[in-house]
């Protein structure tokens, strides 16, 4: 089964999200508020894309750092 262009867009944005999270204060805790804010920023006002990006990214654990979250997100979308 092939992916739709939106699925590819969501995957690409999830990778960008991981890159951004890891680049900025990687040792700081990853918060749900940061995930929501970054998803909204990357979706650039497209509600459907925003909703799909939120659904494609897991809620961060309270004990995890931004670097650990970024690594888990990359594994989730198939990037090592």
Image: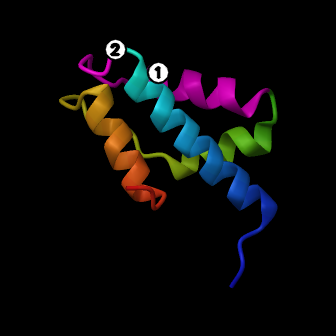
How far apart, in angstroms, are the residues tagged by discs 2 and 1?
Answer: 12 Å
Report the residue marked by disc 1. 34
Q: Nearer the viewer, mark 2 or mark 1?
A: 2
Residue name at image x 81 percent, y 35 percent: 46
Identify which residue is drawn at 42% across, 57% down: 76
Name the foreground residue: 15 vs 51. Answer: 15
Residue depicted at x 50% and y 26%: 20
Q: Bounds of the magenta span?
A: 25-44
Q: Residues within 10 Å of mark 1 (few under 14, many from 20)?
A: some
**Secondary structure category for the residue under label 1:** helix
The residue nearer to you, when weighing 30 against 18, is: 18
Q: Residue at x 33, y 37 (%)?
A: 69
Quadrant (top left, top right, bottom left, bottom right) of the C terminus = bottom left
| Residue 77, position as x, y percentages in the image | 48, 57
**In the image, is residue 28 above or below residue 71?**
above
Is 37 rendered above or below residue 50? above
Is residue 4 visible to the viewer in this orientation of the structure?
Answer: yes
Instruction: Kindly tell me whether residue 60 is visible in this rendering.
Output: no
Which numbered disc covers residue 25? 2
Above or below: residue 39 compared with residue 12: above
Is 36 included in the stretch rendered in magenta? yes
> Can you name the residue that lies furthest to the left here?
63
């Amino acid at each position: 089964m092939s992916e739709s262009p939106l699925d590819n867009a969501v995957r690409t944005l999830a990778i960008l999200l991981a890159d951004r999270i890891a680049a900025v204060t990687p040792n700081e805790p990853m918060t749900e508020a940061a995930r929501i804010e970054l998803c909204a920023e990357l979706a650039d006002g497209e509600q459907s894309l925003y909703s799909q990006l939120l659904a494609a990214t897991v809620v961060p654990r309270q004990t995890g750092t931004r670097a650990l979250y970024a690594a888990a997100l990359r594994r989730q979308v198939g990037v090592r």
